[in-house]
């Protein structure tokens, strides 16, 4: 049975318009992610990162999971969770641990062990919990020995009197995260790990050299916008903005006194983010859906509103970036520029607008060809369905969440966070539980044979 042979994981992604589930593993030979199943349920019960309807959202989570797990006949006790909300806070911080007596330092210092790093990580999480914030995702940026200016990727095994850990943390109010855990508990599931979906989608979209040179990743969805900045492969900035494609629909709906759905249709049919090529005299007519009559308007004026809203979003992003650290803007300008992703970035000539207005290079994300399909356990209909979803950009975020979980950075963090040198530690219990599960499955298989 394949679940006994490889580390298969499932992750649930919550967006403004859907709940998605992906199941996959890393192939031992190719070292590439193999997707076994993808579930999808349309819902607006988590629009803009807010739980709009908890009952509907719970049902959508359960249905999405069921579709995916039924494809491969595997059940999970814990699943990863990828989501974003404007209520999420992010911070770059430093935490320090004295390895020897700070009043009488040892000239030779002390050897740093994994338990020292675990203690720092636990202290950071405890500090934010006391402030009633739940640590969702933590990225270790660097380690520094004593009072040195040199930043190390890993200081374990080295000697020092003092260890400083640099980190980037995403957190949400504890009450918010308790609601999240409650939704999954209704399906008998725990959450591990939780991820900021901006990081998950960046994992899918960005090239390694872009993360190294410096890049600003912008994912504009229907209800919110996620932004991440990387430099030297380190996450330096992340933020969720309360702005999405629906924000533009609201502006158009108010202008023409039409419904949001009508506004969205107009935006998609006639809209462009760069109206410079649109004739100012060109008009068109909208026949109302729910009301009698029609609306006549200038296409140029429609496109001008779209341009204004996208420029307003970019101004918000760059202002937030500069307020956090002036150097971040330089990293983007001198590096790979901006990479765009998300449904609302499909607007015609959006990349042209950003390049013209902000004088910065722009690339639109494309399909990640390092991700493959594992069709061995799927029937013909499900093979076609999963293969189509792998090519559909709407599923990039949930696939990116799996990519991140199997990535080196997260694996190293897990080893540090849950390190325990005692025989009854977490790793020991996990291995014991896995062994018991495998033996149970083996006995069932023998009985069935």
Image (spheres, grey):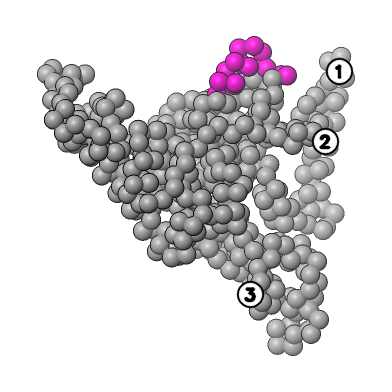
Q: Any magenta on residue 29?
A: no
Residue 212 vs residue 405, the one in the foreground = 212
Question: Which residue position holds label 1?
Answer: 447
| Segment tinted magenta in the rendering | 376-389
Q: Position of residue 275 (x, y in %)?
A: 25, 37
> Residue at left 62%, top 47%?
208
Q: Position of residue 388 (x, y in %)?
A: 55, 20
> Residue at left 36%, top 46%?
354
C-alpha distance separating marks 3 and 1: 63 Å
Residue 333 vs residue 241, the one in the foreground = 333
> Residue at left 76%, top 51%?
426
Q: Position of residue 263 (x, y in %)?
A: 25, 29
C-alpha distance separating marks 2 and 3: 48 Å
Residue 95 vs residue 372, the one in the foreground = 372
**Residue 149 numbered mark, or none:** 3
The dominant secondary structure in magenta is helix
Q: Name the N-terminal-most of marks 2 and 3.
A: 3
Question: Which residue position holds label 2?
Answer: 436
Identify the image quadrant of the N terminus.
Answer: top right
Q: Name the N-terminal-most of marks 1 and 2.
A: 2
Q: Any magenta on residue 388?
A: yes
């Amino acid at each position: 049975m394949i679940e006994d042979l490889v580390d298969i994981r499932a992750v649930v992604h919550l967006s403004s318009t859907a709940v998605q589930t992906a199941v996959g593993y890393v192939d031992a030979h190719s070292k590439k992610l193999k997707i076994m199943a993808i579930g999808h349920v349309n819902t607006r019960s988590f629009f803009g990162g807010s739980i709009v309807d908890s009952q509907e959202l719970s049902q959508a989570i359960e249905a999405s999971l069921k579709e995916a797990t039924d494809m491969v006949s595997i059940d999970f006790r814990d699943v990863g969770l990828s989501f974003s909300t404007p209520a999420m806070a992010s911070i770059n911080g430093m935490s320090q641990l004295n390895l020897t007596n700070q009043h009488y330092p040892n000239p030779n210092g002390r050897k740093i062990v994994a338990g020292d790093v675990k203690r720092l990580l636990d202290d950071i999480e405890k500090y934010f919990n006391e402030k009633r914030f739940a640590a969702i995702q933590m990225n270790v940026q660097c380690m520094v020995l004593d009072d040195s200016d040199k930043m190390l990727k890993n200081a374990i095994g080295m000697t020092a009197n003092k260890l400083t850990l640099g980190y980037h943390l995403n957190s949400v109010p504890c009450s918010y995260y308790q609601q999240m855990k409650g939704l999954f508990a209704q399906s008998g599931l725990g959450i591990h790990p939780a991820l900021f979906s901006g990081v998950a989608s960046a994992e899918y979209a960005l090239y390694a050299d872009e993360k190294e040179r410096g890049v600003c990743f912008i994912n504009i969805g229907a209800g919110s916008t996620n932004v991440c900045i990387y430099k030297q492969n380190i996450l330096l900035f992340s933020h969720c903005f309360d702005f999405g494609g629906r924000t533009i629909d609201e502006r158009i709906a108010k202008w023409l006194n039409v419904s949001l759905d009508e506004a969205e249709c107009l935006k998609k049919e006639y809209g462009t983010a760069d109206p410079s090529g649109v004739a100012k005299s060109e008009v068109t007519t909208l026949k109302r859906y729910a009301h009698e009559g029609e609306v006549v308007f200038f296409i140029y004026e429609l496109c001008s509103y779209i341009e204004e809203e996208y420029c307003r979003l970019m101004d918000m992003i760059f202002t937030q970036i500069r307020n956090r650290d002036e150097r971040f803007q330089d990293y983007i300008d001198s590096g790979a520029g901006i990479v765009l992703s998300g449904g609302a970035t499909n607007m015609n000539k959006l990349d042209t607008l950003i390049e013209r207005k902000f004088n910065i290079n722009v690339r639109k994300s494309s399909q990640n060809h390092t991700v493959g399909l594992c069709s061995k356990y799927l029937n013909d209909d499900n093979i076609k369905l999963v293969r189509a979803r792998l090519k559909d950009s709407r599923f990039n975020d949930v696939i990116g969440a799996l990519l991140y979980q199997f990535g080196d950075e997260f694996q190293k963090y897990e080893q540090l966070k849950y390190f325990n040198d005692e025989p009854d530690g977490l790793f020991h219990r996990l291995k014991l539980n896995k062994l018991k599960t495998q033996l149970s499955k083996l006995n069932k298989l023998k009985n069935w044979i």
